[in-house]
Image (spheres, rainbow, N blue to C red):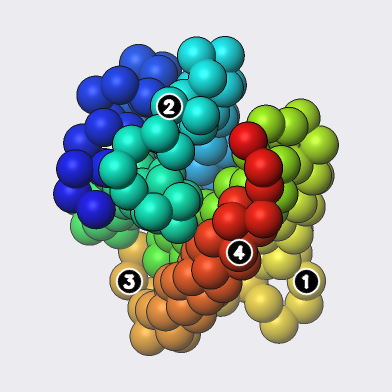
């Protein structure tokens, strides 16, 4: 699998997938829907799928002396690697906003979602949806990706809208707490987001392996 990951990183990946990783730093932007950073990272990964399809990468990969399921797993490993790199940027941004910049007026007066552990958990959910809806959907045909990506866009922005609106619901203001307030509750939500990410990724990868085995390239 290490060789398949290296092949994805060096041959199949679009440079945009790497250039879009720092969009995780959008968590530092005040007065902006910070979860859009997760969408832009996903958009960068989408570019790799697009360029790989045009280069007939899937057919090339199946001609290698590897099992078809390893082709799928290689793609998932690459996607998760990019997502994890972006999540590191997001986590650093969250820590900075909760500590060093906790007294900054520009963040205190932010009308939108604050970059906290709840927001980080929501980013995990968005990446899980990308893996489940788009990557899993792509491997149903190993060629068509427009419909899966549109489906992901709809799901992604529904999550963003719900996350941005939740702290306006009576009794849920704590999800938007600034600094270290309500940290334990937000860490629980972060853990839930990580679990959703892992489940969606694992289940979609297993399903994608089955779907890809059935495809006659």
The answer to the question of whether label 2 and label 3 lie on touching residues, with beta carbons closer than 8 A, is: no
Indicate left or right for 64 with 54 as reference: left
Disc 2 and disc 4: Cα gap in Å? 19 Å
> Can residue 142 be seen in the rendering of this structure?
yes
Side of 132 relative to 205 (left or right): right
Q: Image height check: is 11 above or below 117? A: above
Q: Quadrant of residue 32?
A: top right
Q: Earlier in the sequence, mark 2 or mark 1?
A: 2
Residue at 42% from the left image edge and 79% from the top image edge: 191
Alpha-carbon distance for marks 3 and 4?
44 Å
The Cα–Cα distance between marks 1 and 4, rounded to whole angstroms, is 42 Å
User: Could you give the CA–CA distance between mark 3 and mark 1, rounded to whole angstroms?
Assistant: 21 Å
Q: Mark 4 points at which residue?
A: 210
Q: Mark 3 points at which residue?
A: 180
**Of residues 79 and 105, which is closer to you in this image?**
79
Badge 2 density bin: few <14, some 14–19, many ≥20, Cα 10 Å: few
Which comes sooner in the sequence, label 3 or label 4?
A: 3
Q: Which of marks 3 and 4 is in front?
A: 4
Where disc 4 sits, the SS reads: helix
- SS assignment at label 3: loop
Q: Which of marks 1 and 4 is in front?
A: 4
Which residue is the site of mark 2?
60
The residue indicated by pointer 1 is 169
Q: Which of marks 2 and 3 is in front?
A: 2
- Measured as percent of width and height from the top left, residue 139 is found at 63, 47
């Amino acid at each position: 699998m290490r060789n398949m990951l290296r092949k994805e990183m060096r041959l199949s990946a679009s440079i945009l997938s790497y250039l879009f990783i720092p969009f995780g730093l959008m968590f530092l932007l005040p007065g902006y829907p910070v979860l859009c950073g997760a969408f832009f990272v996903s958009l960068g990964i989408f570019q790799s799928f697009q360029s790989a399809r045009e280069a007939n990468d899937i057919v090339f990969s199946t001609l290698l002396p590897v099992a078809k399921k390893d082709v799928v797993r290689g793609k998932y490993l690459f996607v998760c690697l990019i997502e994890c790199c972006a999540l590191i940027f997001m986590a650093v941004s969250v820590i900075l906003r909760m500590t060093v910049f906790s007294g900054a007026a520009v963040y205190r007066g932010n009308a939108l979602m604050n970059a906290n552990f709840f927001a980080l958990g929501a980013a995990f959910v968005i990446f899980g949806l990308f893996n489940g809806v788009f990557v899993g959907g792509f491997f149903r045909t190993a060629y068509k990706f427009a419909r899966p990506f549109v489906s992901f866009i709809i799901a992604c922005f529904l999550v963003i809208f719900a996350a941005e609106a939740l702290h306006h619901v009576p009794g849920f203001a704590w999800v938007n707490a600034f600094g270290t307030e309500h940290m334990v509750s937000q860490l629980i939500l972060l853990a839930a987001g990580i679990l959703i990410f892992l489940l969606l990724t694992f289940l979609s990868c297993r399903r994608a392996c089955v779907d890809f085995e059935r495809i006659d390239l």
